[in-house]
Amino acid sequence: MKPPPFEYHAPRTVGEALEALADAGPDGKVLAGGQSLIPLLNMRLAAPARLVDINRVSGLDTLTADRKGVRVGALARHAAVERSEAVAERQPLLRQALRHVAHPVIRNRGTVVGSLAHADPAAELPAVLALLGGTVRVARHGEPERDVPAAEFFAGPMESALRPGDLAVSAFFPALPPGSGTAFCEIARRHGDYALAGVAALVTLDDDLRITTAKAACLGVGPVPIVVDVSAECDRRPAASADWAAVAAAVRDRVEPEDDIHATADYRRHLVGVLAERALRSAAGRASHG
Ligand code: FAD
């Protein structure tokens, strides 16, 4: 199908984009990589009167990685972030998760910030931002930029804290604390499909290789990414003798998925237990080996 008619704007600067979005109000939509929005238009599930295409806006394709973390501009494509060695060094979970996002051809065009704005509960990057406690920087005509923490950014299925007129200009993924490791595991029916369920894990060890922090972010099992802190269940045990099956069971018991056409709630809960054990064990292994 073809999309419904819309007015098309192609601003060259952030200021022009914000003016166009302010003029459009609730009838406007940002077009970034188009990998989610264009299918929605073609299926007539969305019908914005005005599209503000940000692909020609200068200064939004930036990607910076330093000891504080990784800042990803609104036009940085999945593929660019996935391939960056500097990003992998400062925040390895991004590359680990991006390998599961769709197919290479979609990752060449889709943007990390677009994935966050789209807020699909089965998407990988919202879970990564939520696990790491990252932020989204939001610009709006006539107002100062604001940083929205992940815990407030994801409001519901396909619903973010972005209001009509807002432009997400970048996202920040904090660097890992020393002694940390991460891992990402998911199950999809076909490679490249959205996951039935997935788990991103972060484990931090002290100098004696005892577990100080263990957290999992679960996707596909709730309206937003579900972050579960299981540090207490690890009881500061040495990573080598942790009971990851018991810790993963604690993660599984804290999610409440629903039945849908793809899987039952019980099956999804079971998947979370299996994936949490794999992801936590692997994250701990990486933390142990520096
Ligand atoms: P767009 O499609 O351009 O926009 C998506 C939404 O976000 C729109 O509402 C748009 O207005 C808004 N938006 C985008 N950028 C901004 C911004 N800077 N400020 C404010 N609002 C903004 N994704 C996954 O996570 N996992 C998958 O497994 C997966 N599989 C896919 C399989 C297929 C076949 C396809 C077609 C897509 C798949 N995707 C998957 C989606 C893909 O990752 C998209 O690229 C991503 O969801 C959106 O990024 P985009 O840049 O294409 O955004």
Image (cartoon, helix red, strand yellow):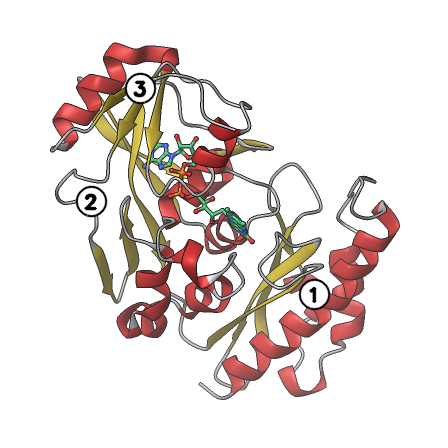
Task: Name the residue tied to disc 1.
Answer: 276
Front-most of residues 106 and 165: 106
Question: Does the closest atom of ligand 1 sit within 8 Å of the Cβ of label 2?
Answer: yes
Tag in front: 1 or 3? 3
Q: Position of residue 107 (x, y in %)?
A: 41, 57
Residue 140: quadrant of the picture: top left
Q: Which mark is residue 93?
A: none
What's the residue at 42%, 70% (across, down)? Answer: 92
Contact check, label 3 and label 2, Cβ < 8 Å: no
Q: Quadrant of residue 22?
A: top left
**x%, y% of residue 264?**
86, 47
Label 1 CB less than 8 angstroms from ligand 1:
no
Whether residue 68 is visible: yes
Residue at the spot x=71%, y=59% of the render? 189
Tell me the kind of residue under disc 1.
Ala
**Of the image marks 2 and 1, the number of the one nearer the N terminus:** 2
Q: Is residue 110 depicted above or below 275 in this figure?
A: above
Q: Which quadrant does ligand 1 occupy?
A: top left
Disc 3 C-beta below 8 A from ligand 1: no
Disc 3 residue type? Gly
| C-alpha distance separating marks 1 and 3 | 38 Å
Where does label 2 land, which residue? Answer: 60
Q: Verify CB contact (< 8 Å) between mark 1 and mark 3.
A: no
Q: Is residue 150 above or below residue 198?
A: above
What residue is rendered at 19% in x and 29% in y? 10
Secondary structure beneath label 1: helix
In the picture of the structure, the residue carrying the numbered disc 3 is: 165
Toward the viewer: 104 or 198?
104
